[in-house]
């Protein structure tokens, strides 16, 4: 239930502006890959191109190929809706649907496309997804309460439960802990470690310790200056990137000399 | 020394605070005073009509017999207007906020707002001189084919000056109110929630159902209530379009009357008890509008837990 992603020569544009230039990267199935780099270097933009969420932004477009187990996401006739149901996403700020209960939030993706699901099946799925997100024990007595009543960390785990309820191949996380306190962050990091047994996880983070803690492989993005495109500088095993990087820029960044 | 500096409340900022809070309080009180004044005027002036012997009131059967047909007529016209206008307005608002390309969206929004700028007497003239004539063949068809429904019972009016025509004109008039308010609310939907829906694999319509409409629900209700207020109180357009008469269930015959049009048509020649009767009718309209607004408030607060405000 997880697939690999291979990106070939990807350029991302906002209108005429080249935001990310010539990225090629191979992301292994059932692994955690972290994207690090200074603000504005295009790592979040690039992450969004992996499930075509960049298309929500007017004028954004890509050139190149993103292959999910060999199938090009940008091939002719590929529906972005299908792509996104295979490649889920967790955002920077927790965003459970405020008008839905906790239970309905978990089932939101499953009920799409008029899929019918019996109450018994739904109960099983809600429990499994919430357990998968380490949230079950905290919310099992209040599934009918609004999701917006939970704490920030719980809301983010609810969003992860919502994402895994549709059983995606890949989960993308865009700075999932940047709005959370250290305890909640730890809970999410533990969860990411468990998720990689079943899913391919790609995480963007500003926190280098977090990247070092959770990821198997790390990609370092950088930008030459304002108005220049972001580029993939170095990609390798997390251990190598943090202890013995090849590029000078990577070493400067991970050792805290800039950024 | 320190104590005095801490407790001293001199300075321009403090005075500004006092002026501002005083002004705000005065404005708030003024609204209440005006509302109370209007209500008091209506009640005092209406008392003679409410207490008069039944045979002195127009129609000769008392105030209640006089008022209830035009209450029903008022509600008829307003409900027709909302039934027609609400789906169109929400559709137009969604098109402008989520479907149309940006250039077209702002142009269309401007045109819809222009609709609200047309004086009601112009709508009335358009309804009476153009729409009524053009639509009367359709009434004939309705009477012939759907006449088994009481609301479409024949014979259809040949002039087209019916409560349905009045309702359609009112629908055009409330359309811009509901559209522009709904559009504003739709545009305020947090990007966060729209993206949450899209990232789960929602189509654009599913995203609207999941994120936009639930978020906008209280706003849509408020917009409809504002539209209803306009439809209930609209006078000129109805007075011009409707060929009024006794209460009838059929919407495509001439007949029925609304409170606002009844007051406007009769007030200039009225005197004595007749004035009182018309003001009492105004009081009834006031109460209906108040009740509608309170129901709307109640509907909105009932779902407060799930509004996303917490």
Image (cartoon, coloured by chain):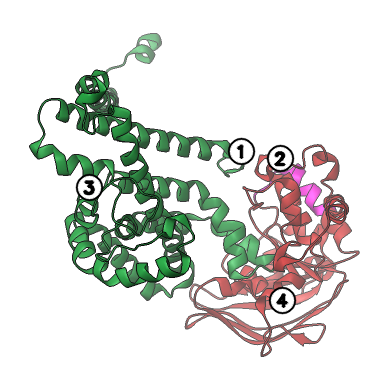
Q: Nearer the viewer, mark 2 or mark 4?
A: 2
Disc 2 and disc 4 in contact, CB within 8 angstroms:
no
Determine if the magenta segment contains residue A185. yes
Give the position of the C terminus of chain B as an image quadrant.
top right
Along the viewing direction, whichever of B289 and B105 lies nearer the viewer: B289
Q: Are marks 1 and 2 on the same chain?
A: no
* Marks 1 and 2, how far apart at CA: 8 Å
Q: Which chain is red?
A: A
Along the viewing direction, whichever of B210 and A155 lies nearer the viewer: B210
Q: Quadrant of residue A83?
A: bottom right
Residue A145: image tag:
2
Q: Chain of mark 2?
A: A
* Marks 4 and 3, how far apart at CA: 55 Å
Q: Position of residue B275 (x, y in %)?
A: 15, 30
Disc 1 and disc 2 in contact, CB within 8 angstroms:
yes
Q: Which residues are magenta?
A: A179-190
Q: In the image, is A39 to the left or to the right of B120?
A: right
* Marks 2 and 4, how far apart at CA: 31 Å
- At x 55% / y 57%, what residue is drawn? B212
Along the viewing direction, whichever of B213 and B103 lies nearer the viewer: B213
Q: Which chain is green?
A: B
Q: Which residue is mark 4?
A: A83
Q: Which residue is mark 1?
A: B305
Q: Chain of mark 3?
A: B
Give the position of the N terminus of chain B as an image quadrant.
top left
Q: Which residue is mark 3?
A: B235
Q: Element type at marker 2?
A: loop
């Amino acid at each position: 239930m997880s697939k690999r992603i291979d990106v070939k020569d990807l350029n991302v544009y906002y209108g005429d502006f080249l935001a990310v230039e010539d990225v090629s990267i191979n992301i292994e199935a059932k692994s955690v890959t972290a994207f690090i780099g200074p603000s504005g270097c295009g790592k979040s933009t690039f992450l969004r191109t992996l499930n075509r969420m960049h298309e929500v932004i007017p004028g954004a477009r890509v050139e190149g190929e993103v292959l999910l187990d060999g199938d090009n996401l940008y091939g002719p006739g590929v529906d972005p809706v299908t792509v996104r149901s295979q490649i889920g996403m967790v955002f920077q700020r927790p965003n459970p649907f405020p008008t839905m209960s906790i239970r309905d939030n978990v089932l939101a993706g499953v009920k799409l496309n008029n899929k019918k699901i019996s109450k018994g099946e739904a109960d099983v799925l809600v429990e499994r997804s919430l357990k998968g997100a380490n949230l079950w024990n905290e919310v099992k007595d209040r599934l009918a309460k609004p999701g917006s009543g939970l704490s920030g960390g719980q809301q983010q785990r609810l969003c992860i439960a919502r994402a895994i309820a549709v059983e995606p191949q890949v989960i993308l996380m865009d700075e999932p802990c940047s709005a959370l306190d250290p305890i909640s962050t730890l809970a999410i990091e533990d969860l990411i470690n468990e998720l990689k047994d079943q899913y391919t996880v790609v995480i963007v983070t500003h926190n280098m310790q977090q990247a070092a803690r959770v990821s198997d492989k790390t990609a370092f993005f950088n930008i030459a200056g304002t108005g220049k495109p972001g580029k993939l500088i170095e990609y390798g095993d997390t251990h190598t990137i943090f202890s013995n990087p090849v590029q000078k820029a990577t070493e400067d960044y991970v050792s805290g000399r800039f950024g | 020394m320190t104590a005095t500096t801490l407790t001293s409340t001199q300075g321009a900022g403090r005075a500004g605070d006092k002026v501002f809070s005083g002004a705000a309080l005065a404005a708030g009180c003024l609204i209440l005073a005006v509302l109370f004044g209007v209500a008091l005027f209506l009640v005092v002036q209406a008392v003679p009509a409410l207490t008069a012997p039944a045979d002195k009131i127009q129609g000769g059967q008392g105030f209640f017999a006089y008022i209830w047909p035009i209450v029903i007529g008022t509600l008829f016209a307003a409900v027709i207007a909302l039934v027609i206008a609400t789906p169109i307005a929400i559709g137009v608002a969604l098109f402008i906020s989520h479907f149309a390309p940006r250039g077209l969206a702002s142009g269309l929004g401007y045109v819809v707002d222009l609709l609200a700028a047309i004086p009601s007497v112009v709508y009335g003239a358009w309804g009476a001189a153009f729409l009524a004539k053009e639509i009367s063949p359709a009434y004939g068809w309705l009477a012939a084919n759907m006449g088994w429904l009481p609301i479409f019972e024949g014979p259809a009016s040949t002039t087209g000056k019916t409560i349905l025509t009045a309702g359609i004109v009112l629908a055009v008039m409330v359309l811009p109110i509901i559209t522009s308010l709904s559009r504003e609310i739709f545009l305020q939907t947090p990007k966060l929630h729209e993206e949450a829906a899209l990232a789960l694999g929602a189509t654009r319509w599913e995203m609207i159902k999941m994120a936009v409409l639930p978020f906008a629900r209280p706003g849509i209700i408020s917009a409809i209530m504002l539209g209803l207020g306009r439809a209930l109180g609209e006078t000129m357009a109805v007075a011009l379009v409707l060929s009024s008469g006794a209460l009838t269930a059929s919407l495509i015959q001439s007949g029925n009357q609304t409170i606002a049009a009844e007051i406007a048509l009769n007030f200039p020649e009225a005197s004595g008890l007749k004035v009182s009767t018309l003001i009492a009718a105004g009081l009834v309209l006031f109460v209906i509008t108040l009740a509608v607004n309170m129901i709307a408030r109640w509907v909105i607060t009932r779902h407060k837990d799930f509004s996303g405000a917490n």
